Amino acid sequence: MSALAGTMRHARYVIGENPVTGLAFALFVIIVFVALLGQHVAPIDPLASDTAVALQPPSPHHWFGTDQLGRDIFSRVVVATRLDFGIAVASVALVFVMGGLAGVAAGFFGGWTDRVVSRIADTIMAFPLFVLAMGIVAALGNNVVNIVIATAVVNFPLYARVARAEANVRRETGFVEAARLSGNSEAQILVLQVLPNVLPILVVQMSLTMGYAILNAAGLSFIGLGVRPPTAEWGIMVAEGAGFMVSGEWWIAFFPGAALMIAVFCFNLLGDGLRDIVDPRRRT
Amino acid sequence: MAIPSLIGVVIVTFLLTRALPGDPAAYFAGPAATREAIEQVRANLGLDRPLPEQFLRYVRDLARGDLGRSLTTGQPVVSEIRTRLPASAELTLLGLAVAMLIAVPLGILAATRPGSLVDHACRVVATAGVSLPVFFTGLILVYVFYYRLGWAPPPLGRLDIFYSPPPAVTGFYLIDSLLAGQPETFIASLRQLLLPALTLAIFSLAPIARMTRASMLAVLSSDFVRTARASGLASSTVVVTYAFRNALLPVITTLGMVFSFLLGANVLVEKVFAWPGIGSFAVEALIAADFAPVQGFVLTMAVLYVLLNLLIDVLYGWIDPRVRIEA
């Protein structure tokens, strides 16, 4: 309990020291709130088109204006939060499990497990990551699930390497030796002793890669992969508004793009702040 | 170093080809094909053979420079990529050059004046740069510089239609137009290039600036810099000749990651600016469910990336002889 209290005090100190982290956390809460309740918050049906009010600039009635089909952009941006956030969370959770387990096993067991995991990570790193994600989605099929998988795969090396390094350091530590001497099997030690110690660092990795995951997914849907119109999603909304930029209807692409930017910015700041709390040594 | 990566890249691209949804033979035979025709295609493509043999065939085709044919254009993928590669390369390299020109001085200034306005600016740029979706930055630049200010030409490819491309020597319009002595074409293609290159630069300058700052800070606090200062050398001599040369090494190492960013972002930027490079080629093929160009594109990008990393390693050894001795 006292350890928890200590962590809380440290967290309060870090947030007090760096108000930007506090701001990012507040933003994060808002994003989660909108993602959960978006359907009920949106004032107008995001799919309802009304050509009578097509291409209207922002006004008190349509805060973010309307698109070429007269759909309310504010409602679409709000509703899209759930899909974008969901894709990012799902892919980060997937790679957290895959990369975390593989990396911890590689660092703890060494030997061929290590060689296989490291070789896979190296091979993925040999590709420009966005290009590999495109290739994976093209090969597995053009849908949202595969966007999640592709985003998870390109992040795999980051997780596997961090987990491997952290598990490797703890391989011969006192508490692991003690567990071994008390008759625990290697698998038990891995799951019950090593993994819990590596988790905080992996959680930081999650928040650091969350921003990249959203960017990656939105980038894929911007080039027409995964999400299909008329679904509301930030990347595809920017793509739909792209053609109107040259004729001056800036609001169609601007608001979804700005929402995307704010979300990524928030996750990156939060990741930095969380790293300061969990691992003060790596502070830059 | 590069050989295992190349082998890994070839294996992965092969697996991606074989993981195509549905039956590739039925796909390549077309929707109206009979059962016999599909079997015929299967035999022609070698898809009835065991997987290892298919892999050997794939490698043999690669060695011959055969990446298959595009279904939509009917052209061999290799020739299409070869004609489009210079457009992408010119854009990417100029983007990198702009990023270096902004990020390296910014990083140095931030490191020599910690806590100053420049230092804070450097941190903001570094965090904002990686948070901006590259297609969004591109569109904003188009809106401001083309629609609002009218300074930039319309975002429609490499050259305005009033100009004809310069005779191809390198495939880089900037160089070719100078070689052919056509200054107007040079200016026109530079104008087309500036916005997309700037978009790429904004996206990729963050890691360079961050790394330059960190490594300059480390070097500036080292003993030899203190000695150089104590000997009464001018501050600029110390920073540029003594510190910067030593701080350059970690910056060169980050270039590997920067290229991963650049090559990926390139695809998005090409779509925004209708740039006729290999990225937009792959995107068009993806939309048309035409897989051979996509695979050729992924393979080309990966091979380029591995080679660039090799080049970075060589460069590293050239700048720092200690690395060579260890190796």
Image: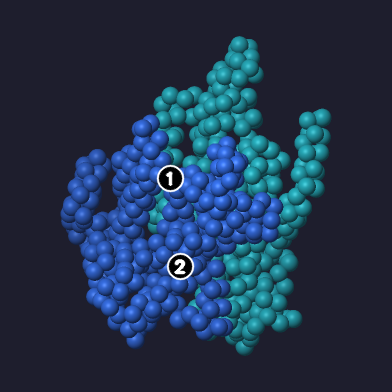
Chain colours: A cyan, B blue
Question: Residue at left 60%, top 30%?
Answer: A195
Query: Where does the image place residue A165, in percent across and percent down from the top left?
Result: 54, 32
Q: Residue at x 57, y 19 (%)?
A: A172
Residue A254 shown left or right of residue B194 in the figure = right
Q: Which residue is mark 1?
A: A125
Judging depth in this view, the residue of B170 and A226 nearest the camera is B170
Callout 1 environment at 10 Å: few (<14), some (14 to 19), or many (20+)?
A: many
Residue B285 spot, x, y in % from top left: 35, 65
Tell me which corner region of the image, top left, top right, bottom left or bottom right, holds residue B326.
top left
> Residue B188: which quarter of the image?
bottom left
Residue B254 in sight here? no
Between B42 and B84, the one lying in front of the other is B84
| Residue found at the very far bottom of the displayed protein | A52
Chain that bears disc 1: A
| Placement of the C terminus of chain B among the 4 image quadrants | top left
Q: Amino acid at mark 1?
A: Met
Residue name at image x 61 percent, y 77 percent:
A251
Q: Please, which chain is the residue tagged with disc 2 on?
A: B
Please count the marks in the image: 2
Q: Position of residue B71 (x, y in %)?
A: 27, 66
Mark 2, Cα crowd under 10 Å, few <14 / some 14-19 / many 20+, is many
Residue picked out by circle 2: B197
- Whole-number angstrom distance, CA of label 2 to CA of label 1: 25 Å
Residue B33: percent from the left, percent from the top? 23, 64
Say yes or no: labels 2 and 1 on the same chain. no
Instruction: Return the residue nearer the eye: A75 or B164.
Output: B164
> Is A88 positioned to the left or the right of A275 in the image?
left
Instruction: Give the residue type that dot 2 points to.
Output: Ala
Q: Is residue B68 visible?
A: yes
